[in-house]
Image: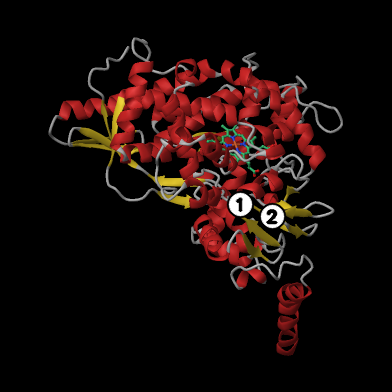
């Protein structure tokens, strides 16, 4: 037995690590990078698991230049002109096997589909849901959730007003607040998550999760995935309804656990992923996936059961056709609904939290934004700003761009496979089958483009730049990516962000509890772990309620 092992171990090491390195099938040996990255992608997983991916890739580019080897078959290219070549419409590169780890249903969704034809079919179905007119039509529905957010924050501010110079503490649902120095302090990340998930739940399938009202991270999922699918199939065929058993789960917590795990394993070869996934530290993420998939199943099943004719996103998905020309089946519907929840929830909440953090940290910028909002919204009798009233405000636009730039909610290099015939980037020919990415985080913080203050929150840069400088900035600004796989929800995200910052910063003054850097979980989405802000109502503004 021992002698078998003695022979086997060197053979496995040679065939897995050394032969690919010395045979160099993708001709990447000339590119610099960390020693271990030349042999194995386990290196990447290790760095990600230590929460240092974007920062590490950025440091490697600073050390080695625009092209860095990140794995046995992959390179990262940090250069504005490279971004469009890799991701643009004429690139021909497809998403890499990295995305297979994110498949939550047996059927792929729009985000993790790698097949070009399959992706085009889905994108055709879903593009009209996100067209500018469709998104504008959702504003009234979305508004309700801004109103609840403001009502909850007003209620907490009232405690601060009552306490005067004293102190107090309490909680709304599970979110604690405490009062001191005339302000109420709480973790705004939780509230932005509640707001974002409730809104996307309502817009996607006509049913908010109810997190804002209760102050609790709770959503209903099906107890059994199989029964859920049966319920959808029966409802679509108009036969007798199946009674669905639902259970409550902490959805945001489960999503965070899932995201923490999947990004760690996604760079590993497929055969290694389930083995690593069994590590105790990754178990909660793996266990969360089926419960989360059940959220969408429950939403679709409930939609059929209630038979409302409200025109939410799911109603439009119901018009979608599968590859045989048939209407989307239960699984594909659930997969696409799930994607709306996950793509639209975390991203907008994190951008809102990070931008609020930077504004709370910078009294000068906050005051300048408030002055612009006071003028624009003077005499408007509404607690929630309308998109029309604020969408062209220059300083507000600059603040939102600056938040998207500096925080880079999706900051990592999104991995693509080089297409047949290869791809030439910055004069380097990359061979077919190799993997290439361009890190959004690094591009959006490059001193060569953004100047010495690239790491500062400075909205004025968007207003002061010359036309030529602005052109260069836009080549290095890709928070929603570009090309055929660019974010489909961009119009919705921007509409929500404009209304959010106009509403909150007109109404409240913000400070940070302390000046510590924003702590983030650096995964596919840069997720703020916690952001404690101190809030008080601005003087002179009277609520309509
Ligand atoms: C600030 C908020 C947001 C940011 C920064 C953002 C960013 C991105 C990025 C960078 C991608 C490309 C991912 C990749 O290629 O792997 C993407 C894809 C996507 N996003 Fe967003 N997103 C945001 C909000 C939303 C919202 C609100 C929705 C919808 C409810 C949404 C739906 C999607 C979808 C469906 C895709 C996949 C598109 C495809 O592959 O064809 N996103 N997003």
Residue drawn at 47 percent across, 19 percent down:
143
Q: Quadrant of the C terminus?
A: top left
Residue 330 visible within the image: no
Q: Which residue is mark 1?
A: 79
Where residue 45 sits: x, y (%)? 58, 62
Please state if 296 lies on the left or on the right of 54 as rendered: right
Looking at the image, tell me whether mark 2 or mark 1 is earlier in sequence order.
1
Determine which of the numbered discs, if any, sits on residue 426 in the image. 2
Q: Quadrant of residue 492?
A: top right
Where residue 251 sits: x, y (%)? 51, 39
Please state if 436 lies on the left or on the right of 433 as rendered: left
For the residue pair 237 and 524, the one nearer the viewer reads as 524
Q: Are marks 2 and 1 in contact (CB under 8 Å)?
A: yes
For the residue pair 345 and 348, the one nearer the viewer reads as 348
Q: Quadrant of the N terminus?
A: bottom right
Where residue 375 sits: x, y (%)? 34, 17
Secondary structure of the residue carrying numbered label 1: loop
């Amino acid at each position: 037995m021992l002698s078998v092992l003695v022979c086997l171990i060197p053979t496995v090491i040679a065939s897995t690590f050394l032969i690919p390195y010395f045979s160099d099938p993708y001709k990447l040996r000339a590119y610099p990078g960390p020693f271990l990255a030349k042999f194995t992608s386990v290196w990447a997983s290790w760095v990600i698991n230590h929460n240092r991916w974007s920062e590490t890739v950025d440091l490697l580019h600073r050390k080695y230049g625009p092209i860095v080897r990140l794995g046995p078959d992959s390179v990262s290219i940090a250069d504005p002109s490279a971004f469009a070549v890799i991701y643009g419409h004429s690139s021909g590169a497809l998403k890499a096997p990295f995305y297979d780890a994110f498949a939550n249903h047996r059927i792929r969704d729009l985000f993790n589909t790698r097949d070009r034809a399959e992706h085009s079919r889905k994108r055709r179905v879903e593009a009209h849901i996100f067209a500018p007119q469709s998104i504008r039509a959702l504003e009234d529905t979305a508004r309700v959730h801004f109103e609840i957010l403001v009502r909850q924050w007003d209620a907490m501010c009232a405690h601060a007003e009552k306490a005067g110079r004293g102190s107090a503490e309490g909680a709304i649902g599970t979110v604690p607040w405490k009062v001191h120095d005339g302000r109420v302090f709480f973790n705004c990340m939780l509230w932005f998550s509640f707001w974002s998930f409730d809104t996307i739940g309502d817009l996607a399938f006509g049913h908010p999760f109810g997190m804002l009202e209760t102050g609790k991270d709770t959503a209903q999922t099906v107890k059994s995935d199989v029964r859920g699918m049966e319920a959808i199939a029966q409802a679509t065929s108009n036969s007798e309804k199946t009674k669905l058993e639902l259970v409550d789960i902490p959805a945001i917590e489960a999503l965070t656990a899932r995201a923490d795990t999947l990004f760690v394993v996604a760079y590993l070869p497929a055969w290694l992923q389930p083995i690593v996934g069994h590590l105790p530290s990754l178990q909660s993420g793996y266990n969360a996936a089926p419960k989360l998939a059940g959220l969408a199943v429950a939403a679709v099943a409930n939609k059929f059961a209630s038979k409302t004719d409200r025109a939410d996103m799911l109603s439009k998905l119901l018009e979608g056709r599968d590859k045989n020309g048939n209407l989307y089946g239960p699984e594909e519907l659930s997969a696409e609904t799930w994607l709306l929840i996950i793509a639209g929830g975390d991203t907008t909440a994190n951008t809102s939290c990070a931008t609020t953090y930077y504004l709370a940290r910078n009294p000068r910028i906050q005051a300048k934004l408030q002055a612009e909002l006071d003028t624009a919204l003077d005499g408007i009798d509404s607690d929630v700003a309308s998109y029309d009233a604020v969408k062209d405000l220059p300083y507000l636009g600059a603040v939102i761009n600056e938040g998207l730039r500096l925080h880079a909610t999706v900051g990592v290099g999104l991995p693509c496979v080089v297409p047949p015939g290869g791809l030439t980037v910055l004069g380097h020919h990359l061979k077919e089958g190799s993997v290439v990415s361009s890190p959004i985080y690094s591009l959006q913080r490059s001193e060569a483009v953004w100047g010495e203050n690239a790491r500062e929150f400075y909205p004025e840069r968007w207003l002061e730049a010359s036309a030529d400088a602005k052109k260069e900035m836009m080549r290095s600004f890709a928070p929603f990516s570009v090309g055929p796989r660019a974010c489909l929800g961009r119009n919705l995200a921007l509409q929500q962000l404009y209304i959010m910052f106009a509403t909150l910063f007109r109404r409240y003054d913000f400070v940070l509890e302390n000046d510590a850097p924003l702590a983030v979980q650096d995964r596919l989405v840069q997720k703020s772990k916690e952001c404690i802000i101190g809030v008080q109502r601005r003087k002179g503004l009277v609520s309509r309620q």
